[in-house]
Every structure is written in C-alpha cells, then in structure tokens.
Image (tube, coloured by chain):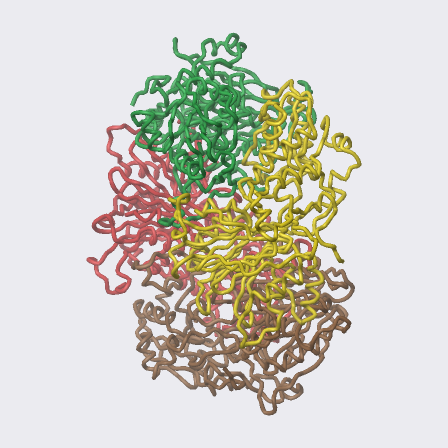
Chain colours: A yellow, B brown, C red, D green
C-alpha cells in the first residue's frame, strides 16, 4: 500500500530527551531531538515542532515549529537557537487540512500559574467534543482545534490552581486520565522533567531508550548513561545512539529526569476491559525495525504473510510484493508456500511532486509512473502479489494492469491484513465508508473492481494470532497491565475498546 | 530620523471591513483588507494576519498569517482562501523579538462557549502582568505573550459563561475596559459584526471610513455605501476607495455591521483625567496624510517646524532635511524663517539588506551609504538640518560628517520635537535610558557627540500648542470625550496618564 | 514620472574595482563591487552579476550571477566565494524579457586562446544585427542575444589569434571600436587589469573614482589610494568611500591596474560628428547626485525647471511635484516663478507587489493607491504639477483625478523635458509610437486625455541650453573630445548621431 | 553502495521527444519531456534543462533550466512556458562543482548562420582539451567548461558556413565524429528534427521508444503512434506511455522527425577496435528495469550474484543486502548458493539533509543513521552481505559495525563486481586512487579496514561473462556494429578503448 495514495494516515509521532548528569550538558539535546524526530517522520510529514528547556528555576523554554519535513522545518539557524536545552520534547504531524496550519503544530506550550508546560500528543481523545465544551464553560477560549491545547488547558484547570501550591502535575495528569480514557501517548515537559504517559488502554505506542556512547552501543553499562529518550517507536533509538530500555505500560505515568526513569503510577482500566493497542501499528504504520510488546514489527509482518499462505494459498509461479512496505509479508508468504520470491516492480524514488496538467493523457498513468516493471522476471508467468492492506484500491489497480500488459498471465492479490470496514476514532485517518473498497459485498467484487484474478484477505483471527503469539511471556506474565493481552481491531470489526458517546 | 536605525517603533496597525447590504457581497473584502493593511505597513513590518467571517449562523472563519511585509505574507493563494468573507479584521505587527514568532501574530482567534471571536489589538495593556496572573489563577493556560490572547481570554472569562445565555459581548467589552484603563485600540469580530473600541484615554488612534464607488469618491451619497472600514489611520482610506467618516472616541464602543455604524457606549475616564492621545503619532509614527482629531498630520508637523523656527532660529544660508519624514517640518521652518529650502541629500532606495562583512572599512560607512550628497547645493554654505526626532544619534552623526566633508561650513541641527527621555509603557518600543542621546546633560554635549555646530529641540509647550491649536472646535466642543483636550507626553516628560503599579 | 509605470527604461549599469598596492589585497573588493552596484540599482533591477579575478598568472576568476535586486542576487555565501578577488567587474540589468534569463545576465566570461576575459556592457550596438551575422559567418555559434557576448566574440576573432602572440587586447578593442561606432560603455577585465572604454560618441556615461580611507574621504592624498573604481555613474562613489576622479572621455580606452589609471588611446569620431551623450541621462535616468561633464545632475534638473517657468508660466496658487524624481525641477520652477513650493502627495513605500484580482473595483485605483493626498495643502487652490517627463500618461492621469476629487480647483501640468516622439536604438527601452502620448497632434489633446487644465513641455532648445550652459569650461576647452559640445536628442527630434542602416 | 557516499557518479541523462502527425500537436511534449527526465533522475540530480521547438520556419525555441531535482527545477509556470513545443530535448546533470553553475547546465543552445541548434550530451570527450584549443585558435571564445558548448561550436565551425548553403547538419555531425571518437550520446535538435547520435564505441547508452495511447500500451499498432522518444535509458518509457523500439547503435546517426525514425549513417570504428559500452551501466548506474543490448539490467545483476556465489562461496546462515541497489545480486547469490535471503536492514527514507553540528557524538553515526537494524532476523547468525560495488568503504564499514553490535556472529562481504582501481576519462566521476579502497594490496587488508570477516569480489572474467551471455543473438549477429561484442572495463583493468593522448 502506497502511503500517499492510501488515504489512511497516522496522525503523529512524539519524541523526548533528557540529558543525564550535570547540567549544562555536553549532550547536543536539540540534535538528538531532531534526529529522533527524523526517524519518526513516517508517522507525519506535514509539520514538526521542538521545545527545549534549560531546566533552570525558572526555566527558559525555546521552541521552533515549521511546516514540512523535519529537514525543512528545522534549518541550521533554528537548531542553533535550541542548542542550550538540557531536555526537550518534539512532535511530527500528519494532517489532512492544508495551508497555513502552523498554529496547530505541536508541542503546545502554555504559561500557567505554576509555570510553563509543554505538551506533545499522539492519538485522539474520544470524548474531545465534551471536554472542549467543559473547558469553554469554565470561561476558557480555545485557540486551536488540536487535542494538545485541550489537554494543556485541562491540566491547568483541575484541580484549581492556588498560587502558593506546589505544582502537583502528577495529580493533574491522573485527573486528566480519569476524564478521558483513550487515546493518547503524551509527553509533558515541566521545567526539568518529562512525564511520559500512555492511556489505560495503551492504544498508542511509547518506548523508552537510554543514550550511551555511540562507539560502545552494545557494551555500554549503566554508568555510561548520557541521557534518556522516549519515543513513539523504538526505531528512532539506534540512529541517535540509544539502547532500547522498555515500553511505557498502558495507564502508566513515567517521570524522566536527569536522575533517570521512575514509574510514578499506573492508572487502571475499568474492571474487565482488555488492553487495546492499535493492531494497525503492526500491520502498516510502524517502521519494521520497531519493537512493540517485546517483538519486532518485521517479524509480526512476516508471520502475517505465513498465516496468509496457510489461509489463502494460490496456484501460481511466483510470489511478489508492491515495494516496499509489504515485503516482509511477501517473504513470509514465499517461505510458507515454497513459491519463489521474485521482484516484479522497481520504484522510481524521484517521482514525487512533478506537476502534471489535468486532462492530458499522462493523467491516466496514475501511480504507474512511480514503478518500473521488471518484465523479464514474470512475463508468461502467474503472479501472486502480497500487499499489507488495501484501502481504496487506487494504487493496486493500475499496478495489476501494468503487470498484465507486460505479460503476467494471472495476477492474484493476497492481503496480509483483514478488510478495513469501520472508522477509527482514536487518531487514525480512514477514508469514508464509500471510499473503502472492503465494503463491497464480496471479495470477487473487489477482484473485479481492481482487475485481479482473485483477492483474499487475512482473517481477523489470523491477524490477532500472528500478533499475539509473539508477545513475550515476560511481558504477559510479569507486568500488571499486560495480565491479559488485547488489541484494538475496531477498524476491522467495529468493536471499539470503550463505548462511544456522542 | 531613519526608522530602522532609530530603535523606536510603533507596535501595530489594525484594520477592519464589513460589506454593506445583502450577503454574499460583491465587495472583495479580503482585497480591501489587504490593501488597507498595506497602507498601515509603516506601523509594523514583521508579520501580518487576516481573519474573515462569512457572517452566517454559525459563521465560518478563515484566517491567514505570515511573516514579513503584507505583500510577502499574503501570496495570491492565501487571498483566494479568504475570498468568501463578508467581513474581516487584520493586523500588522512590529516586534523586536526575532525568529519564528508566527504564533504571536494577530488577530487572535478563539472558540468560546458562545462561539468564535477574533481580536486585533494596537497598544499595550499597562497592567498586563496582573491580568495574566488573574487569568491563570482561574486555571487558564496562556499560549503566547501577546496582549491580544490575554484580551480574548478576559472576554471569555467574565462574566461567567452559561450555555443558554445570549452572548452579550458588549457587557464583556465594558467589563474588560474596567479592568484595564489603557492602552488599546481594539477590533473584535464576532460572527457578523465588528466592535471597534478605543480605551478611555484614547491613547491609540482608530478611525472609521465609508466605502463608496471609486469613480465617485467625492460625490457619492449615503445610498452608495458599499461597506464600512475601520483603521488605525485614515491614510488607508483613499487607497481602497473609502471616505473618511469619523474617529472612534476615547472610551467608545462602536458596532459596525452591514446595517451601518452604531455607537453603543462611551466608557468614561476617572473624574479629572484628561484624554491622552499619544503625541508621537503626530511627531513621527503616523503617515502625513492621516487625520487625527480633525487635523492632517502633515499640517501639525509643518506647524512644529514653524514653532521651532521661532524658538530656535539659526544664522545660516539654507534649511534642509533628512529625507523624508522631516520634510514637512523643514518646509515649515523655511517658511517661518525666510531661509531657502534646499535639498542636500538624496536617498538610495535600494540599500536595504546588502550583506557587509564585519570589521571592514565599509562598516564605517554606516547609514551614509543610504544617502547621496548633493554637493553643489550646499558646498561653502552654512546649513541647518531639521529632523523630526533624534533617538540614539547614530543616523544623524554620519550624515553631519558627510555634509562637512562635502563642503558645508557649518551644520546645525534643529529637532521638531522635544528630547525623548523616558520609557513608554503603552505600546511604543523605546531604547533604554543609556541609549537615549537626550539623556546627556546639555544640548551642547549632544552637539559634540554628533558633531554638529549646535543642537536645539522644540519645547514640550511648543509641541503641545502646535498640536492642540489645530484641533477642530467641533471636535472640542460637541463631543463629550473631548470636552477637555489632552495628550500623552510621557516619553518627553515622565508624566504618565495613569498611575503605574508594578 | 513613475519608473514602473512609464515603460521607459535604462538597460544597464556597469561597475569595476581594482585594489591598489600589493596583492593579495586588504581591500574587500567583492564588497566594494556589491555596494557600488547597489548604488547603480536604479539603472537595472532584473538581474546582477559579478566576476572577480585574483590577478595571478594564470588568473583565477570567480563569478556569481543572480536574478532580482543586488541584495537578493548576492546572498552572503555568494560574497564569501568571491572574496579572494583583487579586481573585478559587475553589472546590473533591466530587461523587458521575463522568466529565466539568467544566461543573458552579464558580465560575460569566455576562454580564449590568450586566456579568459570578462566583459560588462552598457548600451546597445546600433549595428548588432550585421555584427552577429559576421561572427556567425566565421563559424561561431552565439548562445545569447546579448551584445556582451557579441563583443567578447568580436574581441576574440579579430585580429586572428596565434598561440605565440602576446594578447594585445588594446589592438582588439580599437578594432572593435572601428567596427561599431556606438553605443557602449564597456568594462573588459583580463587577468590583472580592467579596460574602461567609451564609444567615440560618448553616448553612455562612465566615470572613474579613487578609493581612500573612509575616515579621510576629504583630506586623503595620492599616497592614501586604496584602489580604483569605475562606474556608470559617480553617485556610487561616496557609498564605497571613493572620491570622484574623472570621466572616461568619448572614444577613450583607459587601463586601470593596481599601479593606477592610464589613458591608452582616444579613438576619434568621423570628421564633423559631434559628441552624443544621451540627454535623457540628465532628464530622467541618472541619480541626482551623479556628475556628468563636470556638473551635478540635480542642478541641471533644477535649471530645466527654471527654464520651464520662463517658457511656460502658469497663473496658479502653488507649485508641486509627483514624488520624487521631478522634485528638483519643481523647486526650480518655484524659485523662478515665485510661487510657493508645496507638497500635495505622499508616497506609500510599501505598495509594490500586492496581488489584486482582475475585474474588481480596486483595479480602478491604478497608481493612485501608491499616493496619499495631502488634502489640506491644496483644497480650494489652483495647482501646477511639474513632471520630468510624460511617456504614456497612465501615471499622471489618475493623480490629476485624485487631486481634483480632493478639492484642487485647477490642475496644470508642466513637463521639464520635451515630448518623446521617436524610438531609441542606443540602449533605451521606449514604448511604441502608439503608446507615446506625445504623438497626439496638440498639447490640448494631451491635456484632454489626461484630464489636466493645460499641458506644456520644455522646448528642445530650452533643454539643450539648460544642459550645456553648465558644462565646465575646463571640460569644453582642454579635452580634445569635448572641443565641441553635443548631445543625443534622437528620441525628441528623430535626429540620430549616426546614420542608421537597416 | 549508497550513491551519495560512494563518490562515484554518472554525469548525465538525456531525453528527447518529437510529436508525430500534424502540428500543432495534441501531445503535451513538455510534460512528456519532464516525466521522461524524472525517470532519468538517478543519472544526475544537480540541475536540469529543457529546450522545446515549435518546429516552424523559422522555429521558435523555448528553454528553461534550473538547479536541483527536476521537480524543483521545473515549477508549473516554467512548464506552461514550454507548452507550445512540438518537439524538444532535455538533460539532467550531476556535478561535483558547487554553487551557481546554472550556466553549465544543458542543453546548450546557439544561433548559427544556419539557424539555432540545441545540444544535450551524456559522456565526456576524451580529447576535449585539444578540441577546445582548436576552436579557440579559430577565434572563438568558450563561455563554459562543458563539452556540450564545445560540441555546438565544433558543429558550427566545420565545414565553413556559407550563407547560401543548405544546413547539412549530418555532414557536420559526421565530421564531429571523426574529430572525437568517444565518449558521447548526443541529442541535437534543429528546427523540426532531433538527431540522436552514439559514439562509434557505443560507450554511453541511448534508446528509442514509441509513444502510444496509454490505455493500449500493449496492443497499440503502428497507426497509433503519437510520437517518438529517445532516452539514455529505456526505464523512462513506461512512465510516459511509450513502448521500447530499439537502441541507437554504436556510431549511428538517427534522425527523429514527425514522420518517424530514420537511420542516416553508421560511422565505423577503426579496424580491429571492439565496441566499448560502459560495463558499469550494468553494475551500478542504470535503473534495473532498463534494457541494454537486448537484456534487462536486473537480470544481469542477478546473474552477477549467481556468478559471485560460484566464485566466492561462504559458509554462513543467511544472505542479505545493503538496500537497495544490490538486491538483485543478493537474490542471485541466494538462489545459487541455496542460502536463505533475509533482510537485515531497513532504510529511513527521510534522513537526507538534516543538519548535524560538527564535532559532536552524532557525527560518529555516519551512514548508520540511514538504516534501521532488523535485529531479530540475524542475531546469533553468520551473515554474508552482497554489495554491488565498494568504492571508498565508508558506507559498508559502519554497517558492518552495526550488524556486529546487534548480534551478527560473522559478517562477510561479497561484491558483485570487480575492484575499481583506475580513473575513467569517459564521463564517470571516480574518486582519486588514494580514496579507492580497492587499491589496498590484498582483500584481507580491505576486510580489516572495513571490519569484515572476509571480502571477495567478482572477477573481471566473471562480470564480463555475466554481461555478455545475455546479449541477444539477434543483436550480435545481425547488426553490423555488434558483429563483435565488447565492453569498456577501463576502471577495472586500466585498458582504455582508445589510446589516450595527453
């Protein structure tokens, strides 16, 4: 599935860093934040923001936000401005709204009676509408449509602030978590600490890493710790010289300071509710080298491919993939089926944004102009193409046509996830019901629509078992919030982790 | 006085427009706003913002903000987005803070329980610190350092909002005016109206104009009204085809809707307090074709020049000016003294931003590279140069040197305003005491410092009389808030219009 | 006359600099070139180019070209690249052709058998078409339409180059001057010298200056010489700390090296031909502080105003000007006539490039939106407006309308130059005959067309005498090429300095 | 091998298009050119240029050049300007020279006595120095260092042009080919035709395609021809809706006009000389879906991998690749060896240009930050990594380190091409001898240097046989210039196709 074409999109990535030891630090915190964010760029390309703090009393915060990719949004002069930070949080964002939305860009920073806080958020509050009304009823004006501002105002609002109070942010965070059950992974920076928070259902991911000397990434011990990082995905750790430490647990509030990582509390789910980590992080969103629940995403995708080969075999000559997110599943399918894995397409990296006039013959090319066809590898043969998901079908359809024109005698499609049929209210942008190809009555209708000889999907049970069989027993048995395993499959089944009120 | 060199700066300009008659309007409101803002560009070059409303129930607001001049901040595609507005407000801003401050850019827009409002503000709240604390004590987080956000939150906060209430914004505005006496000229847009507000002291200007057919700018009657505009300065009216209508009075709340202009209330000053319109609007900030208190700014400046010739005559051969803000005063000085008015400098319009390496001989040129010297006009002669104000002396000093090198036998400086000696807390950026050249003990010290044969300033009394003698008797006699005439001369005298608490 | 509106345009400015004394020099040559070029920006705003040489054997040349104003075309990193130059030439260009013409930008640099030369050119070769054909007949391909490339190829072509020759560039330049009589002021850089050349008719200006310590611009002696500069106009000298030295004479080849300035040759005109310096340099193109033929341009313009008052008096209440190129003439008119000089318009510096939708009421504003009207200065009065020239009438017409609407009872136009009626083939862009307002049969037709009560122009005789009476006797008597005085008035009279072949 | 890190670079790609049938054409020629160029972007990313002709008598040429990727260099407004072309040629360029080199950008366009021609060139003239001298001795100045300008001047120069001649470009092209034997693939546009030329050794590639309706790419017959295209690589054909037609042969001059494709001449090589198509086009430069000499590049690479497995087997647990240019070879190695193909790295597409401060710990990351490690796929296992070539070793070295740190017990390197040891004088940028890792005395020194357990390369014989065994017998037997097969292996063997004179 091609990201830009699919219409399905993650909303955000969050990342934080605290330098260990004495401050001012030798650690180039702003650079660590930037590189960490670059490694989360697949989670959002529209805008990016960084806020750093020097951690002093009172602290000096420095922030920079920009439109576009991290490399565009943070020119060298912006990084120079941020360089005195001893800690910081940052955020990258995907959005369907166009033009001029810098003000919606996170992290959101506000002055409160107890000082300045900064908040970065991945997810979507299911009861945002009610919460906005509550805040406004209190006489607060909301200047953006972002949940991040809403969260900061909720933190400021309850319990009421008194000037002489100590700023008990943990109490405020706990209160927030009772007001909104899901979906959020949050980084909250206050002066010299970062609070890393995951909602009680664990719907969005959040992992902690430890910065060590790059030359001893493997052998570094506790005493070599140069800082702590926290990230939507662990894939960002290697590229900044950090070792994977652990996940923030569902419902957990973790404090990260220069003295280390400390679990402050785990807010429980209602009796009987299971965890609900978004299963599409495994299927599509996450980078394959990230680790969730003790297992590498790549491995899960490969397992999905194997399971798919069992559930939906094909009588063909070769297995291939639409480069490149579906490659692990395709390799898994090939291994299980014994069919040879063969490349049939190569990608033109440079296509991107070339301007094409409407109403010309070239418009008909569509996505095809992004792919070169490796004709000799499949001409005269029967092909099964593995895709990780199919949303609207407008990518796969012209590809099938290309392959047929170039000589494939049969083209079958096998999808390494179940059909997407329902909207997500927890932070994922999914096309409308009308656009979702999976809402066609039967698979053969889909095959007809996209021009394939056959189309089959992985079952929900197959996906869930492929995901859950790899969760480490350590994770399942020893950690309270994982006592029972569970995942959110709402977009596939329509069963939402909590009851939705409107 | 050269703006960029002076270090003295106006903070803002505000502008609004409401189309008259049936909506959707034929009037290109976004274009009127943009051109109106361009005509206020001298009041702020750092950033600009526009918010329009279609005026429907509920209204759709569209906004765009950008860094730099209006022409840069509003590319054609931004204007296209704004084109469905039937009314709108906009703002241009000067700021000393650097990099990446788009979020501080006005108008500020917030959602409240009673709907969305937008606020544009010129001025500075003298009690901003206390008001920020008050708002935050209520549990509100403030996301910017701008007074504009503070004002919106205050409007939302008091009186408490109830969902079933009608949104009595006028009561809220009156309440705001009791909480902060000065300094502000405000435009507040809500759905289909703009409230135009001036603080009870009338510290910042605000004028209303009437849009008429451009081909009949002069002869157009009431029935030809195409819309209403409101602006920091009336100089913006001609360039959009509007006729001057009247000033908003000190303390007045005016409602501008498609049905016309309606005065809702005049909030009084404390017993005994005089109006305090900023006298530096006359001296330096405003464009010479603007009208304040019934008189053209150019005329006041010319009168200041005449008064200066009476107070501080010189025995020289010719009168000249540093182009071009001091020209009216120089012509006035020439008329009064009978000395010939002669140009001695011509300006190079293109100098601007050329990059010059530090520590080179060219650095010594300073401001001189902006001016060509018209040697033959003054070689062998004694010159008096009229300037409108001298702040740090770093413009006038190299100019005097240039003239001497080119053959002027004497160079005297006469300043058409009194020495600036005190800080402003009402919205004007003034350099620190150490930088202010006028804090030297005697005028002859200043002359020595800048290399002039003599330096004299207009007296405060001279300035005040030059300003006040032209205020129309209509304005003085018939309008309640002008019963007594008064102007803020705090930066010259240290006497602030209200007692400052810290 | 407003430049952008007039449709009349100078094509170019050229500038060069050679550091004196030992090399590598302490003089920041690239910066001197840039600032010198900025001071010539009024002669061309489309693109700019610099070429520097380190002057070694063989020399290293560095060049940079860019679109737009000098400040845009030369970002700091470009200047850094150029910083090792000990000498250099540069060029700024105006062009009517649009988009993407960087390759036409000068200086033009070519490798020849005798090494690399760089050429910057102001003017237009009257026989360019024939010369292009000649060069191409020799088997040379021409890659641009610029005369500058043509000149470099002609220099390379004749006399034939032999590898063992010494590169006698002076012989080549002389040969070039026999092939093309006019119009050119040229800078030719080869290794460590610049040749400054003016065509035998002296049609385009070229002046030499001497760089001295900025702190002793006046008192510096020969021994303080830091370098030599050569420029289309002397107005650029002050802003780089240079003293005016002398003009390059018509037909003269001057060599500028680190050892000083040396006249190599003066190529004569045909017997009986007069010099033909472009009279419009005085009227309109040049900056008022430039010196031509020993007199300041401002003074000539003032004299034109005086002459105009004699030739075309008016019975009015005040004299004014369209800011700001016509101000010297207006002051001259006022002095001669005894009428008061009064400002009636003020300019909005920021209008520039604001985007306005076509077909809206705001289009009707035209140039009026660039000017504020100082109503109180002229309401109820009769006004004579002095302009320096009127080309198409589309600037003056809406201004007259503005003044009438604002209350002027009469508006008369007096133009301080004769009507433009003929095309220029020597480097000036003039609108077509149909667009030239002066081709109307009578002045009263023009008055009707632009809405004035009357229109009068300066006579050709009046202009010529105003120009020639100020030429210093030194210049006339002692310098061979000035034995007789003469100016090109072709655009006014249709009499071209040489016979045109087609 | 990572392109940016390798220091080895192709210099150019060329592309042309002629609309068939009646003109003005319905075919959007400028768009076809742009998309064709995008598909050649891997051959050069520094700048791009397009020239179109309307084909009339005389023709109107339109050109646009820009720095950066095609998508940056050709904004929509540039494409609009080019839209009236009925034919055109374009060029994309890689260059090691920095800043401001737009003028070196191709195609090069010149006016000659016989009209305007445009030239685009891929390759490097081995005798450029002597040819430049020859041209300059004729009195021509050369304005760039590009071979493209040199070629245009040579075409204009010989035979001598006479005005009345017919412009026999073919004779001129033949003459050029006798003056310079290699290396060039050329597109020469004149009025309404494009001449496509390959040097007698066929050193650079050039293929012809036929534009057909996109909806019938497969079934379209001769009568459906919409135009003709010519391209450095056939990979560009599919993305514009063109079918592969044939290669231009070594030494061939092909004329492409709206009437079709016509072979005009084949200039022979000296007796006994073999063809010398650059073997590195197969190994590294070309896109895998391109076709050379009748075979798909991907297939050759796969065959190299197989051959490598035979020549240099390893006793390991899995075969992998550095994504993604070496993947075909890795799959070939896996197939031949029977070892499982496993992914060990995933690429972060977004790393690119992030600014990193020098002298920080993050600098140590080097290329590693571009790759995520799929730890679970190889921890505890022995790995052989296949690369397509190793130039300086600075990419592979940190990758090996990453794999070891993540748990690989052994890391062996197998390179699917022979060591690069010699410079190329035919258009490929190769690092200096000192930088070339292959100049270490023994493979085990290289292994030590990059940290591998062992390093082996494909032999030259192995490479040549892997390339030549697939050349179609049709190509070998029937086409004169392929009577004998041969490839340039100069960078591997030091044997250049022609004797080099200096």
Considering depth in this image, is D196 or B396 the residue closer to the camera? D196
**Image vertical order of residue C182 relative to residue C233, above or below:** above
Considering depth in this image, is A218 or C377 the residue closer to the camera? A218
**Image vertical order of residue C404 relative to residue D169, above or below:** below
Image point (70%, 29%), residue name: A312
Considering depth in this image, is D259 or A291 the residue closer to the camera? A291
Residue D1 location, quadrant: top left
Percent x, y of residue B414:
40, 79
For residue C120, say whether it is visible: no
Q: Is residue C309 left or right of residue C481?
A: right
**Image vertical order of residue A262 relative to residue D10, above or below:** below
For residue A96, say whether it is visible: yes
Considering depth in this image, is B260 or D238 the residue closer to the camera? D238
Q: Is residue B457 left or right of residue B230?
A: left
Percent x, y of residue B42:
52, 67
Q: Is residue C23 left or right of residue B482?
A: left
């Amino acid at each position: 599935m091609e990201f830009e074409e699919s219409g399905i999109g993650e909303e955000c990535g969050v990342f934080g860093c605290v330098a260990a030891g004495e401050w001012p630090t030798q650690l180039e915190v702003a650079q660590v934040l930037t590189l960490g964010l670059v490694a989360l760029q697949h989670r959002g390309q529209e805008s990016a923001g960084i806020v750093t703090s020097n951690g002093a009393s009172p602290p000096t915060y420095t922030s920079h936000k920009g439109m576009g990719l991290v490399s565009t949004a943070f020119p060298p002069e912006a990084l120079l401005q941020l360089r005195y930070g001893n800690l910081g949080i940052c955020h990258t964002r995907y959005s369907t709204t166009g033009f001029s939305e810098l003000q919606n860009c996170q992290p959101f920073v506000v002055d409160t009676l107890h000082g300045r806080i900064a908040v970065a958020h991945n997810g979507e509050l299911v009861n945002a509408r009610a919460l906005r009304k509550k805040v406004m009823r209190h006489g607060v004006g909301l200047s953006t449509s972002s949940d991040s501002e809403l969260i900061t105002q909720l933190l400021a609002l309850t319990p009421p602030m008194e000037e002489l109070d100590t700023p008990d942010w943990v109490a405020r965070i706990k209160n927030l978590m009772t007001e909104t059950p899901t979906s959020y992974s949050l980084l909250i920076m206050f002066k010299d600490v970062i609070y890393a928070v995951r909602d009680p259902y664990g719907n969005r991911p959040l992992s902690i890493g430890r910065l060590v000397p790059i030359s001893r990434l493997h052998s570094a011990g506790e005493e070599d710790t140069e800082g702590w990082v926290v990230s939507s995905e662990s894939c960002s750790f290697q590229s900044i010289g950090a070792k994977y430490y652990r996940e923030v647990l569902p419902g957990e509030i973790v404090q990260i300071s220069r003295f280390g990582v400390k679990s402050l509390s785990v807010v429980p789910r209602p009796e009987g509710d299971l965890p609900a980590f978004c299963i599409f992080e495994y299927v599509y969103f996450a980078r394959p080298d990230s680790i969730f629940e003790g297992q590498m995403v790549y491995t899960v995708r490969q397992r999905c491919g194997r399971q798919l080969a069992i559930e939906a075999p094909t009588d063909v000559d070769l297995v291939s993939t639409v480069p490149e997110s579906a490659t692990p599943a395709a390799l898994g399918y090939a291994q299980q089926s014994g069919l040879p894995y063969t490349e049939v397409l190569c990608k033109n990296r440079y296509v991107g944004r070339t301007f094409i006039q409407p109403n010309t013959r070239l418009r008909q090319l569509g996505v095809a102009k992004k792919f070169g066809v490796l004709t000799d590898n499949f001409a005269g043969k029967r092909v099964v193409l593995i895709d990780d998901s199919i949303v609207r079908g407008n990518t796969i359809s012209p590809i099938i046509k290309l392959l047929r024109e170039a000589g494939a005698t049969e083209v079958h499609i096998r999808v390494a996830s179940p059909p997407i049929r329902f909207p997500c209210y927890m932070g994922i942008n999914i096309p409308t019901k009308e656009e979702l190809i999976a809402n066609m009555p039967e698979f053969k209708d889909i095959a007809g629509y996209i021009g394939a000889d056959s189309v089959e999907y992985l079952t929900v049970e197959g996906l869930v078992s492929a995901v859950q069989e790899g969760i480490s027993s350590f994770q399942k048995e020893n950690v309270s919030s994982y006592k029972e395993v569970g995942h959110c499959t709402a977009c596939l089944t329509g069963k939402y982790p909590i009851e939705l009120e409107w």
